[in-house]
């Protein structure tokens, strides 16, 4: 894969740490162009322009995506841009059971995405969680 985007929302930095590790994993696996962007810096159209994408968001509300930026971004993704596209989902959570990420994965699959992995991490990612993020990031290289 030549171009990968890692797009995330993070309120207190946990998902941001994961995003950095995912991007690092993709870079180390040889992806020449890795864009690491907050969702506020990204536009949904970017998904159509990259070979693979990683999307990160913590569980918010009651087991939903963050509603002011991430949910509108995800809602704007089209089947055209996602059909057959490798997608990695990641994010932090606390008291829930990962429902938000399972539903997010189903939603992406429903639009034709090839979900490579779903990576929920409880609260702040520990070194072993960051290692899993780097490994998942390496999957985006498609080697
Ligand atoms: C408004 C709000 C709603 C939340 N809702 C959930 C939830 O439904 N399920 C859950 O497991 N954690 C929930 N959490 C906990 C966050 O997912 C958790 O604190 C996470 O580590 C935040 O990640 P971040 O540092 O990337 O913002 C919520 C936190 C906040 C502030």
Image: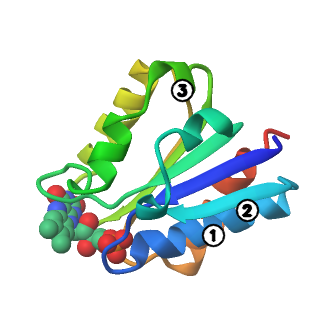
> In 3D space, how far apart are the residues under numbered discs 3 and 2 (Cα atoms)?
22 Å
| Vertical placement of residue 87 versus 16, above or below | above
Judge by depth and name the residue closer to the eye, 41 or 66: 41
Question: Where, by quadrant of the figure, is residue 13 drawn?
Answer: bottom left
| Disc 2 target residue | 25
| Disc 1 target residue | 21
Label 1 crowd bin: few (<14), some (14–19), many (20+), radius 10 Å: many
Q: Disc 2 vs disc 1: Cβ atoms closer than 8 Å? A: yes
Residue pictured at 63% horizontal, 51% vertical: 5
Q: Would residue 112 be found to the left or right of residue 71 on screen?
A: right
Label 3 crowd bin: few (<14), some (14–19), many (20+), radius 10 Å: many
Q: Indicate the position of residue 21 as horizontal and vertical percent values.
A: 63, 69
In front: label 3 or label 2: 3
Q: Indicate the position of residue 139 as horizontal and vertical percent values.
A: 72, 46
Secondary structure of residue under mark 1: helix
Question: Where, by quadrant of the figure, is residue 32 drawn?
Answer: bottom right
Q: Would residue 93 be found to the left or right of residue 13 on screen?
A: left
| Vertical placement of residue 142 versus 138, above or below | above
Q: Is residue 95 visible?
A: no
Q: Quadrant of the N terminus?
A: top right
Judge by depth and name the residue closer to the eye, 30 or 47: 47
Secondary structure of residue under mark 3: helix
Q: Indicate the position of residue 126 as horizontal and vertical percent values.
A: 51, 79
Label 2 crowd bin: few (<14), some (14–19), many (20+), radius 10 Å: many
Q: Is the CB–ligand 1 distance for label 2 below 8 Å?
A: no
> In 3D space, how far apart are the residues under numbered discs 2 and 1 (Cα atoms)?
6 Å
């Amino acid at each position: 894969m030549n171009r990968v985007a890692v797009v995330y929302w993070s309120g207190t930095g946990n998902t941001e740490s994961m995003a950095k590790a995912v991007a690092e994993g993709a870079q180390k696996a040889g992806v020449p162009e890795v864009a690491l962007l907050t969702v506020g810096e990204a536009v949904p159209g970017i998904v159509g322009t990259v070979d693979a994408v990683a999307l990160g968001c913590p569980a918010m509300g009651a087991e939903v995506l963050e509603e002011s930026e991430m949910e509108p971004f995800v809602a704007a993704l089209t089947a055209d841009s996602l059909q057959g596209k490798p997608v990695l989902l990641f994010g932090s959570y606390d008291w829930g059971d990962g429902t938000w990420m399972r539903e997010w994965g189903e939603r992406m699959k429903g639009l034709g995405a090839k979900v490579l992995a779903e990576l929920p991490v409880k609260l702040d990612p520990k070194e072993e969680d960051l290692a899993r993020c780097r490994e998942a990031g390496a999957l985006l290289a498609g080697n």
